[in-house]
Image (spheres, rainbow, N blue to C red):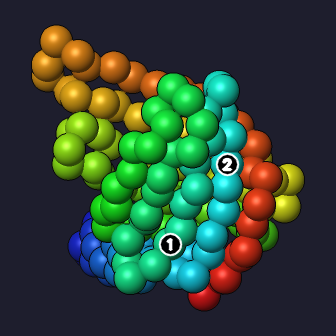
């Protein structure tokens, strides 16, 4: 009897935990714009229309741009986890933005399963920011 009650409680907890995580994966940064710098390159980015839009404005990726759907989760005060998949380079990207300290860290898996496959683990600074939290 105790085993069934425990199993039922674990099942209910699991359901609520899943629902809570889904509710937290949203486009929480809509309207936010920023410029960030890493390893001699820089990106002008904005979150709009449920997409992450970006344009590189310093070498080595000067002029490259694109957009893709994104998910975000608030993990602290002005601290966000953002993830997206960018189809042209088959990239899977995760970024942690710390808007209090104006820094970010990113991890990316680019062109998985190909000769050009690459894993990135980088960090940088945020120079310009207009933050719109939802």
Horizontal side, residue 95 vs residue 100: left or right? left
Q: Is residue 62 left or right of residue 74?
A: left
Q: Quadrant of the C terminus?
A: bottom right
First in sequence: mark 2 vs mark 1: 2
How far is mark 2 from mark 1, CA to CA?
A: 14 Å
Q: Quadrant of residue 33?
A: bottom right
Query: Of the numbered discs in the image, which one, if any, rests on residue 106?
Result: none
- The residue at the far right in this view is 101
Tell me what residue is drawn at x 55 percent, y 60 percent.
45
In this rendering, position of residue 83 left or right of residue 95: left
Residue 36: mark in rendering: 2
Label of residue 47 in the image = 1
Please tell me which residue lies in front, 77 or 10.
77
Q: Nearer the viewer, residue 71 or 125?
A: 125
Seen at 57% across and 82% down, the residue is: 31
Task: Note whether residue 23 is visible.
Answer: yes
Residue positioned 30% across, 30% down in the render: 110
Identify the image quadrant of residue 59: top right
């Amino acid at each position: 009897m105790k085993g069934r009650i425990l199993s039922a409680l674990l099942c209910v907890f699991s359901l609520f935990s899943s629902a809570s995580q889904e509710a937290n994966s949203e486009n929480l940064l809509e309207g936010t714009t920023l410029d960030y710098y890493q390893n001699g390159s820089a990106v002008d980015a904005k979150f709009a229309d449920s997409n992450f839009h970006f344009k590189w404005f310093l070498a080595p990726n000067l002029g490259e741009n694109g957009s893709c759907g994104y998910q975000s989760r608030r993990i602290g005060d002005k601290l966000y986890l953002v993830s997206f998949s960018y189809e042209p380079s088959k990239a899977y990207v995760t970024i942690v933005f710390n808007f209090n300290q104006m820094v970010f860290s990113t991890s990316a898996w680019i062109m998985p399963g190909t000769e050009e496959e690459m894993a990135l683990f980088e960090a940088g600074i945020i120079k310009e920011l207009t933050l719109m939290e939802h």
